[in-house]
Amino acid sequence: MIYSIVPCDQLINYPQDSNQERIEVDINGENVVLLKGENNTYTIERLISTNPRAYLNPELMPGTMIMTIISKKDSPCVKWEIINNGLELMRE
């Protein structure tokens, strides 16, 4: 339950960008919202977790760029590889 003076639709809904596609996926057991980029790259926009340790994991930090890797054509499993970490972006 959320107690806030901000209307619920502003807290829960994402801004409507026609150019950017968002997907929710599971990475290392945690739900994250990804923004689709170019050439199978994605940027972590948001982490959704009740585990406080997940927010301390630099691999799940918003701004981290990741790439999809599909191991086999018939396999439904998708693996994610970190391209650059959000901490590198903060240093620049």
Image (cartoon, helix red, strand yellow):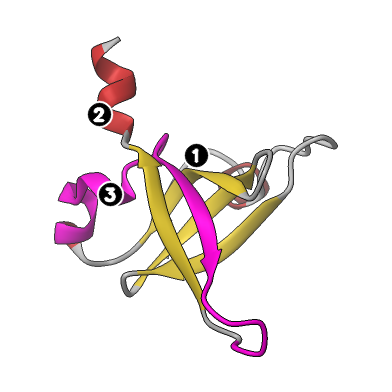
Mark 2 vs mark 3, CA separation in Å: 9 Å
Residue 75 drawn at (x, y percent)? 59, 88
Circle 2 SS class: helix
State which quarter of the image contains the N terminus. bottom left
For residue 59, the mark is 3
Residue at x 68% of width, y 39% of height: 38
Mark 1 vs mark 2, CA separation in Å: 32 Å
Answer left or right for 82 relative to 16. left
The residues colored magenta run: 53-75
Answer left or right for 21 relative to 4. right
Residue 9 drawn at (x, y percent)? 67, 49
Determine which residue is flagged by label 1: 5
Q: Depth check: 69 or 54 in front?
A: 69
Circle 3 SS class: helix
Answer left or right for 57 relative to 39. left
In the picture shown, does residue 63 fall above or below 49?
above
Give, as a three-letter code, the residue at label 3.
Glu
Give, as a three-letter code, the residue at label 1.
Ile
Magenta stretch: includes residue 65: yes
Magenta stretch: includes residue 39: no
Mark 3 vs mark 1, CA separation in Å: 32 Å
Q: Depth check: 51 or 36 in front?
A: 36
Determine which residue is flagged by label 2: 87
Residue at the far top: name it.
Answer: 92
| Camera sees residue 72 | yes
